Amino acid sequence: MNMDHHFLELEEQGFTIFPGHLDRDLTARARTAMDALMPPVGSVETKRHDLRPPFEGPVWPELFAKPETVELASRVLHAENLRLRDQAIIRTDPQPGVEPRIGWHFDYPFRPEDYKAEPRRYFTQFMECLSAVPSRGAALRVIPGSHKPMLHALAKATSDEELTALR
């Protein structure tokens, strides 16, 4: 499959979506394994559940080290020697009648020279949705193109204090 248009979109918008990246079987097995690690949906007050390694079970290495994902990361970072930096499993339970809380942060703590370097000197994030997500119902909101003003602001920062203030 030619994915060049996805990489152009990623450069321009700061994100892209790869439909069909996970097949239904792997998605279902990962969702079942995730639910087994967390309280049943709706059983506790907490609506957001974050888990960090170690994760038990055979589905996690299959999901996190999927060859297609490694190939995507290699293309995005312009690098062959990759390292898995972090893994997380996050489930946000439905909250009927509750408008999602809007809070902002950015996951781009790198300077323009890190972005332009070959290979690139930053990390990339892949998020795998394990269930249907209704419009305005996701735990994540992406602002297309929002990485570009941040790159310009980071380029102007001249001290560690200024960089910290941007994060």
Image: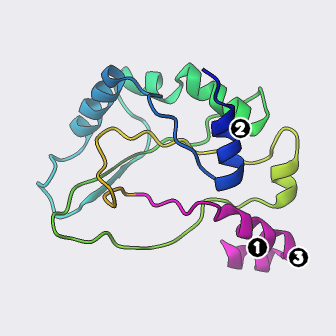
* SS of the residue under disc 2: helix
Residue 128 relative to residue 164: left or right: left
* SS of the residue under disc 1: helix
Main SS class of the magenta portion in the image: helix
**Mark 2 neighbour class, 10 Å CA radius: few under 14, some 14 to 19, many 20 or more:** some
Distance from disc 3 to disc 2, alpha carbons, whole Å, reads 27 Å
Depth check: 123 or 98 in front? Answer: 98
Query: What residue did someone put label 2 on?
Result: 76
Q: In the image, what residue type sits under mark 1? A: Leu
Q: Which residues make up the magenta segment?
A: 140-167
Distance from disc 1 to disc 3, alpha carbons, whole Å, reads 8 Å
Q: How many marks?
A: 3
**Residue 163, disc:** 1
Depth check: 49 or 29 in front? Answer: 29
Give the x, y percent position of residue 52: 43, 45
Residue 46 relative to residue 55: left or right: left
**Mark 3 neighbour class, 10 Å CA radius: few under 14, some 14 to 19, many 20 or more:** few
At 81% from the left and 61% from the top, the residue drawn is 111
At 38% from the left and 41% from the top, the residue drawn is 129
